[in-house]
Amino acid sequence: MQASESVGAPAPEGEVAGRRLGPIGTLGVVSAGHLLNDLYSNFLPQLLPFLLVLMPGFTAAQAALLVAAFNISSSLFQPIFGFAVDGKGHTWLIYVGTLWMAVFLSLTGIVHSYAALVALAAIAGLGTSAFHPPASAMVHGLSARYKAVYQSAFVAFGNFGFALAPLALVPLFQAFGLGASTLLVIPGALAAAILFFALPRQGRRPREAAMLAVVWASIRRSARELTAILAVISVRSAAYTGLLALLPLYFHSRGVSNIAASRMLTLMLFTGAFGGIAGGFISDRWGRKILIVGSLVLATPLFFGFLASSGVWSLVLLALAGAALLSSFSVTTVAAQEAIPEHKALAAGLSLGFANGLGALAVIFIGRLGDLWGLTQAVALLVSLPFAAGLLGLFLRHHPGQAAPKRP
C-alpha cells in the first residue's frame, strides 16, 4: 500500500500495507502489540480471586459486571474507531491505544472502591477499542491470498497474550499484592514506543470515502451476511467472556488453588491460539462456513466432557474445547471484512468489537444467574452457547475457499 493510502483502503492483489518492514515484519510487530494488548485485556479476571478476599461479599454478579465493563467499552466503540480509520488513516490509534490501556489498568490494583474499579475498567477498555480496528485492517492488507492465515496469526498472538496473563499476573499478585499492578505500565509504554517507530505511516483517504451514506449503503448491501456473522460472534463472545469471568470463581468454589486455576485457564487459551491458526488454514482452503459451524458445534460437548471428568482426561478435553471455541475467532473477522471489503477497519470494529460487546452484555445477566442458581449451572449454560453459535452459523453464505491444486 502506498504511503498516501489509508490502512483501511482496499489494496491491489498482493500489495503490502507499508514498505518499511515488509509484510512479515509488519505482521510480526503488529501481532506482538496485539499480544500485549490482549494480555492486558485478560488482566481483570486475574484480580477476581484476590477481590474475593479483599472485598467481603464480592459476588458473581459483581465479578461479571467488572469484566463486562471493560469488554463493553473495549468492544462497542470499535466500529466508531473503525469508521475513523477507514476515512482518515488514524494509525496512531494503534500505539496510543496501547499506552492508554496500560496506564488505566495499572491503577486498578491500588483502588479500594468497587465503583472506582468498574470506572477504571471501562475507561481502560477504550484503549484496546482504539487498537484493534486499525491493527486488523493493516494485517488484512498484507496478503491478497492468505488473508485468514495472516489474520489468524495476528489473532493467535492476541490469544497467546490472553493465555500468558494468568501465568504472569497471578504469581505476581500472590507474591507482591495487587499494588504490583502499577508496574504493568512499563511494558505498555515500551510497546507503544516500538509500535510508534516501527509501523508504516498511512495518509488520508479521499474525503468522500468516509461519508456515512457510503458506509451505510455498503452495510445494507451485505446486511443478511453481516447479521449472521455478528450473531455468531455475539453468542460465541458470551460464552468466551463468561468463562473468563466465572471459571476463576468456579474453580475457587471447588477448592482449586489460584495457581492451579490459572494454569487451567492458560491451557485453554494457549490451545485456543493454536486452534485459531489451524482454523485460518482450514477456512482458506475449505471455506469459512465449514470451519465456523463445525468448530463451534464441537466445542460444547468437549466443554461438558471437561466438567464431567477429572485428571489427565479433564485437561485434554479442556485443551480441545479451547481450540474448538477459538478456531473461528479470526475467520469471522475475515468473513466480515469480505462482506464489506471497502471498509475493512469498520468490519473489524463490528466483528472484533461491537458483536463481542453484545456478548459481554449478556455475561452480566449470566453472572446474576450464577448468584441465583449457583456457579455450576451458570457455567453449564455458558458452555452450551457455542453449540447455539454453530447453529446460527448455518445461515452464513458458503465461501468455498481455495481448492488444493490439481496434480498434472
Image: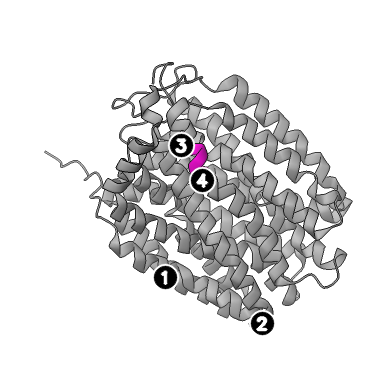
Dot label at residue 156: 4
Mark 1 Cα-neighbour bin, 10 Å: few <14, some 14–19, many ≥20: many
Query: Circle 3 sits on which residue?
Result: 83
Toward the bottom, the furthest residue is 373
Residue 92: x %, y % from top left: 58, 26
Residue 350: x %, y % from top left: 45, 47
Dot label at residue 387: 1
Q: Please name the amino acid that badge 1 sits on.
A: Phe
Closer to viewer: mark 3 or mark 2: 3
Residue 18: x %, y % from top left: 45, 21
Query: Circle 2 sits on which residue?
Result: 372
Closer-to-camera residue (331/111): 111
Q: Earlier in the sequence, mark 3 or mark 2?
A: 3
Mark 3 Cα-neighbour bin, 10 Å: few <14, some 14–19, many ≥20: many
Indicate whether residue 79 is drawn in magenta.
yes
Q: Earlier in the sequence, mark 4 or mark 3?
A: 3
Decide: marks 2, 4 in contact (CB < 8 A)? no
Residue segment shown in magenta: 78-83
Tell me: residue 100, above or below residue 4.
below
